[in-house]
Amino acid sequence: MKFFRIMLTCVSVSLALGGCATFSQDGGFDGVKKTSAEHIKQEIVWSKTEAEQKAVADRVAELLKTPLNADSAVQLALLNNKDLQASFYQLGISEADVVQAGRLPNPKFSMLYARNDGDYKIEQALTFNIFSLVTMPKMLEIERSNFEKTKRSVALDVLNLAHETRLAYFNAVAANERLSYSEQVKESAEASAELANRMVKAGNWNALEQATEQSFYAEAIVEYANSKNQQTSAHEALSRLLALPLDQLVLEKRLPDLPQTIDELHAYEKTAFEQRLDLQAMRLETQALAKQLGLTKTTRFINVLEIGPARVLEGRRGDPYKKGVDISFELPLFDWGSAKVAKAEATYMQAVNRTAQLAINAQSEIREAYSRYQTNYEVAKHYRDEIVPLRKKVLQENQLRYNGMLISPFELFANARAQVASVNSYIATLNEFWLAETALQMSLIGSASKEGK
């Protein structure tokens, strides 16, 4: 009976310690939602059940009823992107590691049975790795730290997807506008080339003048084809992020207007980089490695220490069992743990240096992103306030001269093309500004992804 009491005590201790870490109700998702909400206003959903998936499908259908703007495109991506849903399950994996770290390994039962002419030798032992009792608190602390790091990494995945979607959305809308204006230029060049052919047939033009107009038309056709390809690529990039087919994507016709003013640099400098999620995750990883290093140093000489009740019968079958305790541990005859400690130290110092470099990179990325943001704003503003109005004024004046038969229709066509080209350039610079603004916001959260650029 004493044997079974000892076994029961060991099992009770195991169960009690196992209760130190249990699965949470939200699986860490509420932490991710809270972090994401600090940077974006769109909601995220971890759709695990059939009812949740149906609710997401209904929400997606509702969003698709109206032309998408940048915010609704981001919301669609956050609801529908499967890679993001896969990232959410990383929370479950990490939390399972925490729970596992809070549980004792299973007890080990061993038995030796031998019989010779009525004599028996039976050895029974139930042992536990009690060394895990010593390391359990430290392992729990390490895994909890890793879980916190996973929450920040998943939140960064959410914000990265929002960032990539905004970039892809602006590129898609700008591609639509460029295609529209390229089509206008092509039609103007086509009309000009057709008129040139008639002038040659009437004997009023020479071959050089005809070839000049035809070359404009030929170049306009190539430009239109390139614009068409760019539009297809931009829409496909957006389609992949939203996980929706192209025929369901209806976008707003124009990019958002240029804002009246932009923020000053001081809002982005100083300690802004310290709030970056990638830097916070790297710090947590470094702290976990420091704890892992301490644990490795503590346990370098003892890898296994097992103890448990045992009983032995030697002799006739009816003889009483001899009861005692079975203890075993690994002797450090060959492995003194120096290699493990060296590896842990190198891993820790590697993380320390990477964290330091990440902090330096973060400051530089914010400065670079702000410079690009500011420059593109000034360029787009110059196009909007100076170049486009001047081209429009030139076209209006030439329209008056053409009406007075002071210039030829070809000069009017050329001016119309130049005016359209200036508008097209403004669209390109406006798109660059919104891309830069999106990249600047992302630089305050983490390293900007290259996707969508």
Image (cartoon, helix red, strand yellow):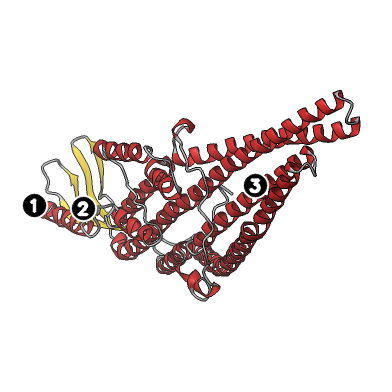
Question: Marks 3 and 2, how far apart in space?
Answer: 86 Å
Amino acid type at circle 3 is Asn
Q: Residues within 10 Å of mark 3 (few under 14, many from 20)?
A: many
Q: Is residue 24 above or below residue 338?
A: above
Q: Secondary structure at mark 2?
A: strand
Could you say which disc has been placed on residue 310 in the image?
2
Q: Where's residue 285, x and y in %?
A: 45, 63
Q: Position of residue 104 (x, y in %)?
A: 27, 55
Q: Is residue 388 left or right of residue 136?
A: right
Q: Is residue 45 above or below residue 308?
A: above
Q: Which residue is mark 1?
A: 1
Horizontally, is 425 left or right of 336 in the view?
right
Tell me the kind of residue under disc 2: Ala
Give the labeled residue for mark 3.
Answer: 424
Residue 113, position in %: x, y?
24, 40
Residue at the extreme front = 404
Front residue of 111/286: it is: 286
Residue 94 is situated, as x and y percent measured from the top left of the image, at: 36, 52
Q: State left or right for residue 87 relative to residue 193.
A: left
